[in-house]
C-alpha cells in the first residue's frame, strides 16, 4: 500500500512528537521531524509528499519562508499556529496552505486536515492501453478484479484491463483499498453496504471470501 510521506517542522519538541505519532496512526509515513526552518532547509531531501509547518518557528527562518520554498516545489502543506495575528494570517493565506491547525492540537482536526489532502498525495497510476500510456487516479477506481495474469480495473466510466498480478497492483494503492477476496480489491469510499458474504459497490455485488471476513470492519 502506498503511504504518503509527511514532514513535520515544529520547534516545540512535545508537539512535534505528538504530531509524528498522529501521522503514523493515520496511516501516513513520517518522513522526518525538524525543529527549525534552518535545519529543514539544510537537511531535507525534498522526497516528501506534504508537510506540517509551524508558522512561528523559534529561529530566524519563519514558517512563512519555509512554506514559500515548498510552494516553489509544489509541495502541499498545512500551517500550525497558536497565534491568530491578523497580519500573519493574511500573509499565510497568500501562500495557499491546505489548512490551518490551531494549538493545542485536536486529534479530529489533524485527522480532517490530513484526510483532506490524502488523495492529492497519492500518485496517479500509469497504465498501458490500446492507445498507449495513460494514467488513472486511485480515487476513480471502484474495485479491481483478478483474472489470472490480468487485472480488470473498474471505474464509473469504463473497465481497464492490464497484464498485472493483483498483489502487484495493490502495492500502488492507498490504505482505503481493501482486499475482500483472493480475486477482488475494493475502494472503501464506494462501498454502499456489506455483510459477511458480499459487499456492494455501485451496481456490483462482490463476494467476500471466508479468509477475508471482518476486514471491512477495521
Image (spheres, rainbow, N blue to C red):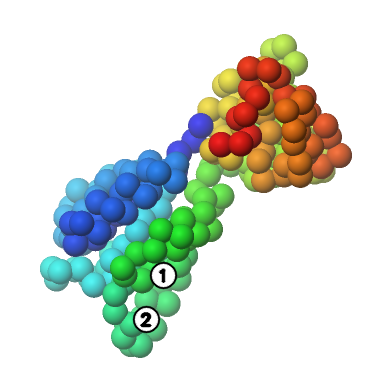
Contact check, label 1 and label 2, Cβ < 8 Å: yes
Between 61 and 142, the residue placed more toward the observer is: 142
Mark on residue 89? 2
The residue shown at (39%, 83%) is 90
Q: Is residue 180 left or right of residue 119?
A: right
Mark 1 and mark 2 lie on one chain; the one further toward the N terminus is 2
Q: Is residue 76 left or right of residue 64?
A: right
Q: Which residue occupies the extreme top position in the image?
A: 148
Percent of width and height locating residue 40 = 22, 54
Percent of width and height locating residue 104 = 31, 68
The residue shown at (23%, 72%) is 56
Mark on residue 100? 1
Q: Mark 1, residues whose alpha carbon is within 10 Å: few (<14), some, or many (≥20)?
A: many
Q: Mark 2, residues whose alpha carbon is within 10 Å: few (<14), some, or many (≥20)?
A: some
Identify the element where label 2 is drawn.
helix
Percent of width and height locating residue 172 = 54, 32
Q: Splitting the image into 4 quarters, where does residue 79 fall?
A: bottom left
Between 212 and 74, the residue placed more toward the observer is: 212
Tell me: residue 66, above or below residue 85. above
Tell me: residue 20, above or below residue 173. below
Query: How many numbered tags mark residues here?
Result: 2
Q: Which tag is nearer the camera, tag 1 or tag 2? A: 1
Amino acid at each position: 500500500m502506498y503511504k504518503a510521506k509527511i514532514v513535520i517542522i515544529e520547534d516545540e519538541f512535545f508537539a512535534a512528537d505528538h504530531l509524528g505519532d498522529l501521522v503514523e496512526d493515520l496511516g501516513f509515513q513520517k518522513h522526518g521531524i525538524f525543529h527549525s526552518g534552518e535545519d529543514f532547509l539544510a537537511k531535507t531531501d525534498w522526497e516528501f509528499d506534504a508537510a506540517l509547518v509551524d508558522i512561528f518557528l523559534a529561529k530566524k527562518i519563519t514558517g512563512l519562508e519555509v512554506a514559500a520554498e515548498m510552494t516553489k516545489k509544489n509541495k502541499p502543506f498545512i500551517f500550525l499556529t497558536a497565534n491568530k495575528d491578523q497580519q500573519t494570517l493574511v500573509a499565510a493565506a497568500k501562500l495557499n496552505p491546505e489548512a490551518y491547525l490551531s494549538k493545542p492540537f485536536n486529534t479530529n482536526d489533524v485527522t480532517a486536515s490530513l484526510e483532506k489532502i490524502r488523495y492529492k498525495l497519492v500518485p496517479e497510476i500509469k497504465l498501458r492501453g490500446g492507445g498507449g500510456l495513460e494514467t488513472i487516479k486511485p480515487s476513480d477506481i471502484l474495485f479491481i478484479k483478478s483474472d489470472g495474469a490480468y487485472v480488470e480495473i473498474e471505474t464509473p466510466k469504463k473497465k481497464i484491463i492490464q497484464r498485472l498480478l493483483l498483489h502487484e497492483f495493490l502495492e500502488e494503492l492507498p490504505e482505503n483499498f481493501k482486499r475482500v477476496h483472493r480475486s477482488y480489491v475494493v475502494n472503501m469510499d464506494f462501498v454502499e453496504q456489506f455483510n459477511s458474504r458480499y459487499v456492494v459497490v455501485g451496481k456490483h455485488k462482490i463476494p467476500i471470501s471466508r479468509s477475508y471476513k471482518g476486514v471491512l470492519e477495521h
